[in-house]
Amino acid sequence: MRLIQFEYQGRLAVGAVEDEQHIRLIQVDGGTYQLARDALANNRALAEEARLRAGDTRLYYEQIVNEGRLRAPLSHPDPAHCLVTGTGLTHLGSADTRSAMHAKLAVGEEQLTDSMKMFKLGLEGGKPVAGETGAQPEWFYKGDGSIVVSPGAPLPVPAFAEDAGEEPELVGLYLVDDRGQPWRLGYAVGNEFSDHVTEKANYLWLAHSKLRSCSFGPELLLDPLPARLEGQSRILRDGEVLWKKPFVTGEDNMAHSFANLEHHHFKYAQFRRPGDIHVHFFGTSTLSFGDGIQTRDGDVFEISLPAFGRPLRNPLTWQQEEASATVNHWN
């Protein structure tokens, strides 16, 4: 089952995708967030809760898309209670671009870069057996729910940005229940979106490079995730394909297991705050930046994985002026 969120008659609605053309309206007030809370309260799986609440109303998917009413498939009523984070160097081959980016920082060719050291840790210990703790991955913070851009909506690029590059990834979507226990609701396709020029200048600026908007969806996959997934990432310019490349994901193509990545995120007590939702990007191995692509205003990112239904599309829009960052004071 796949779910979408969208605006319908002045409220945030949930629909189950029936086929490429139709969705079935789910009877719930409060979007996917409330549907998931109700499922937990009723001791039911999210897919079962959705099936029990599926009404007779069928809507045209394309109309929702064309009217700009699609929203991210999971959101919190208060964006401050949605945390957006991610892990890097998780996929087989993901170290190639990063290592080339940082190679000049290495003392000698015989020495591994910090990125390669981190990647090697994942290869050796990123998939521990049940009951054991695996290698700690690279981790970063992107922002709260205010940075999430709806599918189809423009991704804003700060005026100070050096680059605006896509990162096609799987996204884990989570809800923390009233007892502080995280629950994985499902997965979505995501564009983690980053400033690779800033990161390339100094890898200690990775944290800065990640503080950008992002997008995920449009569909939330509730079914078990295939171990091997292959999709395609494209950039369109003036209606023509500027760049495209396949990408692979799923645990068979990763150095870390999902369970290990989740453990090293939710082991922190501040990430188990009851009622919060988490949007966690799992990393990628394919970047247009690695092929020398420089994006510009109006370019459209398109990321597709067949198992997730419709592609995720977002145009770029450069902000012309920087917001004031001056700090006021009384003395």
Image (cartoon, helix red, strand yellow):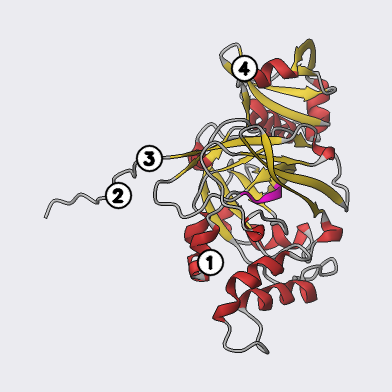
Q: Amino acid at mark 2?
A: Ala
Q: Quadrant of residue 132?
A: bottom right
Check contact, mark 2 vs mark 1: CB within 8 A: no
Instruction: Measure how far apart labels 3 and 4 are at the Cα level.
Output: 27 Å
For marks 3 and 4 on the same chain, the one whose residue lies earlier in the sequence: 4
Residue designated by label 1? 200
Residue 309 got which mark? none
Residue shown at the point (51%, 60%) measured from the top left: 197
Residue shown at the point (61%, 21%) measured from the top left: 69
Check contact, mark 3 vs mark 4: CB within 8 A: no
**Residue 241 left/right relative to 231:** left
How crowded pointer 2 is (Cα within 10 Å; few <14, some 14-19, many 20+) is rated as few
Q: Secondary structure at mark 4?
A: loop
How crowded pointer 1 is (Cα within 10 Å; few <14, some 14-19, many 20+) is rated as some
Q: Amino acid at mark 1?
A: Lys
Q: Amino acid at mark 4?
A: Glu
Of badges 3 and 4, the one in the foreground is 3
**Residue 280 left/right relative to 143:** right
Of badges 2 and 4, the one in the foreground is 4
For marks 2 and 3 on the same chain, the one whose residue lies earlier in the sequence: 3
For marks 2 and 4 on the same chain, the one whose residue lies earlier in the sequence: 4
Tell me which segment is drawn in magenta. Answer: 166-171
Q: Which residue is at the front of the view, 116 or 72?
A: 116
Q: Which residue is at the front of the view, 318 or 61?
A: 318
Residue designated by label 4? 67
